[in-house]
Amino acid sequence: QEEVIVSNGVINTTATVPKRITAVYDELYNPYAYLNVKDLKVTGTDLTYGVDYTYDDDVLTVLSSKEITIENTDKGTPTDNTITVAKDVSANIILAGVNIDVANTGVVGKYSGSAAFCIPSYSQGDVTVTLKDGTENTLKSGVSRAGLEKSGTGDSIGTLTIKGSGTLNTYGGNDGTGIGAAYDSSKSCANIIIESGTIIANGSAAGIGGAKNGSGTKI
């Protein structure tokens, strides 16, 4: 394998080492900038890959409470890359022009599809989603999933807060909701607060709330 050494934007590829890429950098070079060539662009202050987020197998996972801004690299083209918040993490996410479409995933009556934006079931973390001013954000999920998914109930369940002055369009899959529960073992959701923004939630079950045969509380 070829070793790639990057310093001050200059690339040298003269040496070879087994299966590794080395980045030598200074303040003029961001060692994680290569992530922004993926379908979802990530920006923020003092974000550390592997500590604050990961981006593997087309899934962007938020790992910490540091403010993180997410947008499509190509805002005019939907992506099948998805966003997940790690379980029990209190995340602060700014959506700045996200367009995620995994509506074609899953098979009705056989297996569930993918969620465009997923907070794991029964997560205790408080997640804040801010819609950046002037942006339109679209989340389309697959069979049985919610567009912006937050399943589970109970005293320890976290709260999802949506705010900002942008627009959010969500689409749940078959038996799922626009914002709230997937048609999973819970089917229900709790603790959703919408402070501001233009929200258009489309679900096969509820627009916002519980999935088929489920319920929504404290919304």
Image (cartoon, helix red, strand yellow):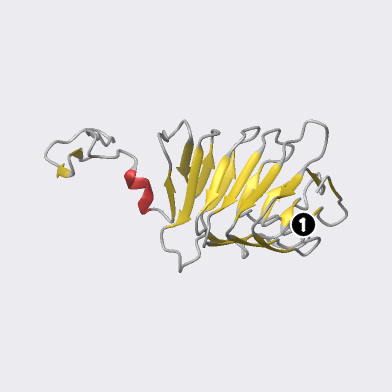
Above or below, 92 against 72 in this view is: above
Q: Residue at x 47, y 39 (%)?
A: 54
Hey, what amino acid is under mark 1? Ile
Furthest residue in direction left, as rendered: 14
Q: Position of residue 141 (x, y in %)?
A: 64, 59
Q: Residue at x 50, y 65 (%)?
A: 78
Residue assigned mark 1: 208
Tell whether 134 sits left or right of 196. left
Q: Position of residue 171 (x, y in %)?
A: 68, 63
Tell whether 80 sits left or right of 157. left
Circle 1 Cα neighbour tier, 10 Å, few/some/many (<14 / 14–19 / ≥20): many
Q: Nearer the viewer, residue 167 or 77?
A: 167
Q: Nearer the viewer, residue 124 or 126?
A: 126
Q: The N terminus appears in which quarter of the rendering?
A: top left
Q: Position of residue 160 (x, y in %)?
A: 69, 44
Q: Residue at x 41, y 63 (%)?
A: 74
Q: Nearer the viewer, residue 130 or 21?
A: 130
Above or below, 76 against 44 in this view is: below
Q: Residue at x 86, y 50 (%)?
A: 215
Q: Position of residue 155 (x, y in %)?
A: 82, 32
Tell me the element at label 1. Answer: strand
Q: How many marks?
A: 1
